[in-house]
Amino acid sequence: MKLLNFPLLVLEQILISMNYPQLFFLSFCSNKTKRLISLFKYNLIEFAFCFGQYALRVFFTDKNKKHCLVCKIFSFRAGAVSRNLTIQYPSRPFTEFTDHYRGRFAVFCTPNIRDARVFIDRWLRKECCDNLNNAIFFNTTGRPFDDTLLVNFGQKRIDRTTMPTVPEKYPFDKDDLYYIGGGSDKLITDGSYYAERFDGKFATIAYWDTYVVFSVWDKRPW
Amino acid sequence: MSVENAPVVDVDEAAIPVEKKMYYRFESNDKKEFRVSELAIQQSETLNRLVEAMGYTSEDVENKPAIAIENIDGKTLKLVFQWCEHHKGEAIPVDDGSVPKIVEIPEFDAKLMDIDNGLLFKLIWAADYLNIVQLLNVSCKKVANMAQGKTPAQLRRVYLLPSDEEDEAAKRAAQEAQDPRAREVEEEFEERKRQGGNSFF
């Protein structure tokens, strides 16, 4: 399918249906795609690119909000979409990167399941990302993550028939859903894995295609 | 019932006993004929305006030739009308201008669009041409979803995107194929722009 053969108005519809990580990855394909995205995504302004040793940082402003996108896309390693924070040294290893992370929402683009597992281990020990509310692990290879990620969670699952006070859906706000891409109907809590941290915080983890959704709850939700 | 076997024509006429429903006849560019209910046609702004302008009676619909849709083939038109029949009576969504646009793809639509990329491409063209807002929304979302989980290199393959070098080569080839006089005019125009002139004339 030749994307650029669509009429311009159709092309606009396709581009505005994409979420930010998809658009940015698309913008790296050619100068033409970059121009098209700038043209249609009228609310994305002030692009600034910054190449590091292993990573590319993209700073942009969406209306009044400032964002920073960090991509290690050229080596297919890790990357992140960050709001509320500018990451200082994103070209370091993933754990160092998460150590610096103080945002409340992140999309980690990584095909490496070990990175996700390390992240969860460290979060459970309260060693990283303590401000985090939600994180999305996004497998850039397009394959779903395997179940080994859940070892840390002791295979405990939310069952809303016995835990009726657990909300039916993950409480993502509209902005966060932009990054995840798609509607809220898929973010069902039932069946998600969960674990309790020593300080009383809870984490849940849900699978959604090539995404793993990691969420933090301040208190036991049931 | 699978999407393939779903009827294009709604036969449940008993549901509306008082007013007889009217079915319009359309013909694709490969001479395939379709009968589509009046209510389903309302999903397409183009067709709806067309039939309103024609002002056909029930007799006209049967006796006059089918309305020709010149630029859409039968296979594509069948999908379009299946979609319209399934969603007939539904409100046509109004774009609220939000970006990124959040579009849900219903199960029926997902099955309907479980087709090869070539046909999906034609379906989007048809939805755009016939101005079927929601079909265009869901089909564009389907194309947008193809980008999920893809690296730039994979995106180039999925969307057949030319590289910068290929774009440049195509541009050069187009310039070489251009009429020499037109090229001279273009060069003159560029030269005047460089000299600070606001107008060519």
Image (tube, rainbow, N blue to C red):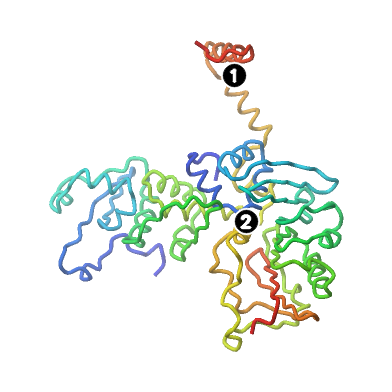
| Residue identified by numbered label 2 | B148
Q: Is residue B84 above or below residue A60?
A: below
Q: In which image quadrant can residue A144 be found?
A: bottom right
Q: Which mark is residue A181?
A: none
Which residue is drawn at the image coordinates 75% and 50% (left, top)? A73
- In this picture, residue B161 sits left or right of residue B109: right
- In this picture, residue A150 sits left or right of residue A3: right
Q: Are marks 1 and 2 on the same chain?
A: yes
Amino acid type of the residue tagged 1 in the rendering = Glu
Q: Are marks 1 and 2 in contact (CB under 8 Å)?
A: no
Which residue is drawn at the image coordinates 24% and 51% (left, top)? B25
At numbered mark 2, what does the secondary structure look like: helix, strand or loop? loop
Towards the viewer: A202 or A18 = A202
Q: CA distance from mark 1 to mark 2?
A: 39 Å
Which residue is drawn at the image coordinates 63% and 68% (left, top)? A208
| Residue identified by numbered label 1 | B176
Residue B198, given in percent of the width and then of the height, sits at 55, 15
Amino acid type of the residue tagged 2 in the rendering = Gln
Q: Is residue B155 above or below residue B194?
A: below
Q: Is residue B36 above or below residue B196?
A: below
Which residue is drawn at the image coordinates 72% and 75% (left, top)? A203
